[in-house]
Amino acid sequence: MGIRGTRSCRDAARALTIAAAMAAAMSCAPVQAADTNVTANAAIVRPNTLIKTDDLNFGTLVSGPTGGTVTVNPVTNARSSGGGVTLVGTTAQRATFQGTGGIFLITVSGSTSVTLARIGGGAPNMTASLVRAASTSGGGIALLGATLLPSGVQTYYIGGTLTVPANQPAGDYSGTFTLTVNYL
């Protein structure tokens, strides 16, 4: 009988524990819930950027007894000469700019010519007419009018034709020009 009594006490203790847990759970007040609608918004804006990665460089040349020209093609980056100018070396390059941005349309404007002055002075200035070209990621390069439809990263190229007077004095010549890209 003692064995039965011990088992009964254990069963009774277990039953009391379960009953106490159930009573405690029932004595808690039910939780109230309320629903409301909330709106989540996001706006993604591409950063409007334009950076120069290369300068326009007509390269090294020799001015002859007659005037001439040096051209850097903005599409192919090829250099050529005409008239009394002789090309030296292969250091010429088109100017290159990288840009991202725009939502609907990009307008491109800027200088159509640049004046190159001899560093230190003492020589006539030279003038270059500028030509713009552009490409978009995944596309080819084309001469650029005024607008370009955006598609990822845009690359802008500037080339042009430098007019070199006859017997232009030796020296380094430099000038600046502007490229403006408006992202709309």
Image (cartoon, grey):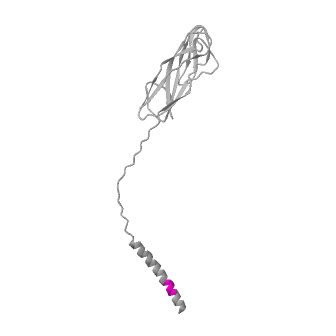
The residue lying toward the viewer, choosing from 114 and 150, is 114
The residue positioned farthest toward the top in the image shown: 65
Does 101 sit above or below residue 72? below
Task: Work out which residue is located at the far right of the displayed protein and give it.
Answer: 89
Residue 41 at x, y percent in the picture: 39, 46
Image coordinates of residue 154 in percent, x first then y, are 49, 32
- In magenta segment, residue 151: no
Q: Which residues are magenta?
A: 7-11
Which residue is located at x 42 percent, y 75 percent? 22
Q: Residue at x 42, y 73 (%)?
A: 24
What predominant SS class does the magenta segment belong to? helix
Q: Is residue 58 left or right of residue 154?
A: right
**Residue 9 vertical position relative to residue 163 in the rendered view, above or below:** below
Which image quadrant for residue 64?
A: top right
Q: Residue at x 35, y 58 (%)?
A: 35
Image quadrant of residue 170? top right
Q: Using the rendered view, name the quadrant where residue 91 is placed.
A: top right
